[in-house]
Amino acid sequence: MIGLVLAAGAGRRLRPYTDTLPKALVPVDGDTTILDLTLGNFAEIGLTEVAIIVGYRKEAVYERKAALEEKYGLKLTLIDNDKAEEWNNAYSLWCGRDAVKHDVILANGDTVHPVSVEKTLLAARGDGKKIILALDTVKQLADEEMKVVVDPEKGVQKITKLMDPAQATGEYIGVTLIEGSAAEELADALKTTFERDPDLYYEDGYQELVNRGFKVDVAPIGEVAWVEIDNHDDLAKGREIACRY
C-alpha cells in the first residue's frame, strides 16, 4: 500500500499564501504544512511510498521533495496534472490512476486530520470492500460540505455537496482507502466524469461508480477534530487543530 495526495489545486481563496505556493504547502503549525501533516500520518502507519499529484505552483513541491523524503523516510513520486488550473479534481485523481493499482490511502491536499483517520480506514479493510470513505457522522452539516447518504447494507447511495444537509448520513472528509482491485473501474468512472464536465469533483466519480452498481463503503471516524482548508477562516481553525497533533 502507498499514500496518494491530491496537491494540484490553486487555493485562490487563501491568497496571498497561494500566490507562490500550492494550497498543500500553506503552513499550519510553524513551518509545518498541510502536506507535512499528511506525510507524517502516512509514515506513522508504516507506508514507505507516496505519490503526489502536483499542478499549480508545482515547482515548490519539487524543490521540497528531497527534504520531505528525508524528514519522513518516504519515497515520493510526483505526478504532473497538466490541467490543474483549468479542470477540477476528477481529472486530478485520474492522473494518479496507475498509483491506485498498488492499493492507496488517498488524502486531499487541503485536509488537516489526525492519523486516527488512516488507522480507522485500515481497520475497516476486508470483507470484499474495495473503496472505503472516511466519514464524519458527528459534525453539523451545512451547504458547502461533501455530503453522503449511506444505506447500512448497500453502502454509499449519494455523494454530493448539492443536498439538503438533513438528508445526509455524514460528511466525506477527503480521505479514502482504495484497493488496487478497484483501480480500473475507478479510472473509467473518473474519465466518464471529467469528459462529461471537467469541473466535476472526483467524488462525482464515486457517484458514477455507485450508479453503475459498484459498492462504495464508509468508515465513521468518530469524534475527531479535522478541517478542510478552503479559506482564511478554515486556515485559522486548521492552525488551532494542527498544534494538537
Image (cartoon, grey):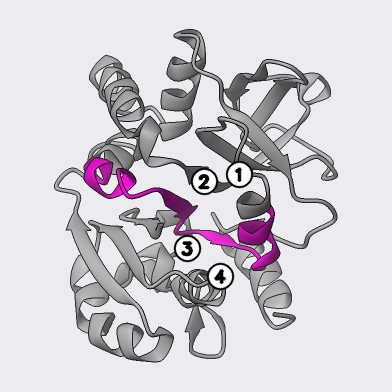
Furthest toward the front, the residue is 127
Question: Neighbour class for label 3 at 10 Å: few (<14), some, many (≥20)?
Answer: many
Give the residue pinned by disc 4: 45
Mark number displayed over residue 177: 2
Viewer-proximal residue among 105 and 31? 105
Question: Neighbour class for label 4 at 10 Å: few (<14), some, many (≥20)?
Answer: few
Measuring from the top left, give residue 53's x and y in whole percent. Answer: 28, 56
Of the image marks 1 and 3, the number of the one nearer the N terminus? 3
Viewer-proximal residue among 229 and 62? 62
Measuring from the top left, give residue 141's x and y in whole percent. Answer: 78, 37
Of the image marks 4 and 2, the number of the one nearer the N terminus? 4
Measuring from the top left, give residue 91's x and y in whole percent. Answer: 27, 36
Give the residue pinned by disc 3: 14
Query: Element at badge 4?
Result: loop
Give the residue pinned by disc 1: 125
Furthest toward the left, the residue is 82
How far apart are the two marked residues, 4 and 1, measured between alpha carbons?
A: 14 Å
